[in-house]
């Protein structure tokens, strides 16, 4: 019986490792929040946020993009402000947490952005904003090292006609909230499983090609 040489076995193991690495990369990508894809234009998806269970709602700071203005986050429950304000986008670090307040299961949650530089207060409800545009973007978020799984929300802090005018990048105050569900009239699809499967398949095909080529050369 013909035995594979140590060199061929080594090549086979490297090809397997490459396939596994590609698969891991695909699933890692799917774990991150899906960024807003149409920078420069208003997000037409409107969101409704609801308390998932009775208890506290915690926000975790995710990032500020290239925001220059100083922003802080707040929240209302059934139209009443909880009084908890924080997660300054200029001084917070990724993973910093803020207890936004208590809610009962099914309560309506609205997030607010307080912009210190302009005095504007933006709402996650479009109809509440004086410039008539949507100031939030949202997507699902899977857990990472510093932030648990939850709902990713990102605010745009510039007014439609302001100084400067809005750039609609939806990165100025980014956070993840737990104990909240979000619905939208235009959901953003998650990275599909077939993408990960295709990458894994590519790794296996590459592995087969390498071993076949080595076998012919032997």
Image (cartoon, helix red, strand yellow):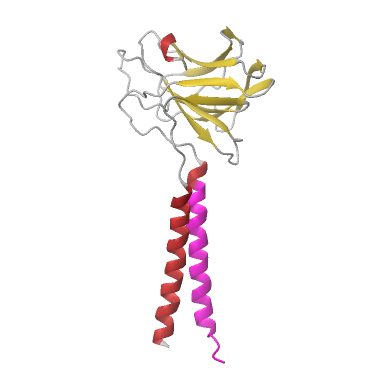
Image: magenta residue range? 1-28
Residue 62 locus on image (x, y percent): 52, 31
Foreground residue, 66 or 204? 204
The quadrant holding residue 165 is top left
From the viewer's perspective, tell me whether residue 96 is left or right of residue 90. right
Q: Residue at x 45, y 62 (%)?
A: 201
Q: What quarter of the picture does the C terminus occupy? A: bottom left
**Main SS class of the magenta portion in the image:** helix
Q: Among all residues in the image, which is located at the extreme bottom?
A: 1
Residue 91 appears in view: no
Q: What quarter of the picture does the N terminus occupy? A: bottom right
Residue 164 locus on image (x, y percent): 30, 17
Q: Residue at x 39, y 86 (%)?
A: 217
Decide whether residue 4 is among the magenta residues. Answer: yes
Residue 42 locus on image (x, y percent): 34, 23
From the viewer's perspective, tell me whether residue 82 is left or right of residue 128. right
Residue 114 locus on image (x, y percent): 48, 13
Decide whether residue 92 is among the magenta residues. Answer: no
């Amino acid at each position: 019986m013909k035995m594979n040489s140590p060199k061929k076995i080594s090549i086979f193991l490297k090809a397997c490792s490459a396939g596994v690495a590609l698969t891991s990369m695909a699933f890692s990508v799917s774990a991150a929040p899906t960024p807003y894809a149409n920078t420069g234009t208003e997000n037409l998806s409107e969101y409704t946020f609801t308390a998932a269970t009775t208890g506290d709602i915690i926000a975790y700071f995710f990032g500020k993009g290239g925001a220059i203005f100083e922003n802080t986050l707040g929240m209302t429950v059934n139209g009443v402000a909880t009084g908890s304000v924080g997660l300054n986008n200029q001084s917070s670090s990724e993973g910093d947490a803020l207890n936004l307040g208590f809610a009962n299961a099914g309560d309506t949650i609205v997030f607010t952005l307080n912009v210190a530089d302009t005095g504007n207060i933006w709402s996650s409800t479009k109809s509440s904003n004086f410039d008539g545009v949507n100031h939030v973007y949202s997507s699902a978020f899977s857990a990472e090292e510093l932030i648990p799984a939850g709902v990713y929300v990102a605010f745009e802090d510039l007014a439609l006609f302001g100084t400067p005018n809005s750039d609609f990048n939806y990165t100025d105050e980014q956070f993840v909230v737990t104990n909240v569900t979000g619905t939208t009239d235009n959901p953003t699809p998650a990275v599909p499983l077939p993408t990960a499967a295709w990458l894994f398949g590519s790794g296996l095909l590459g592995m087969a090609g390498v071993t076949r080529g080595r076998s012919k050369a032997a």
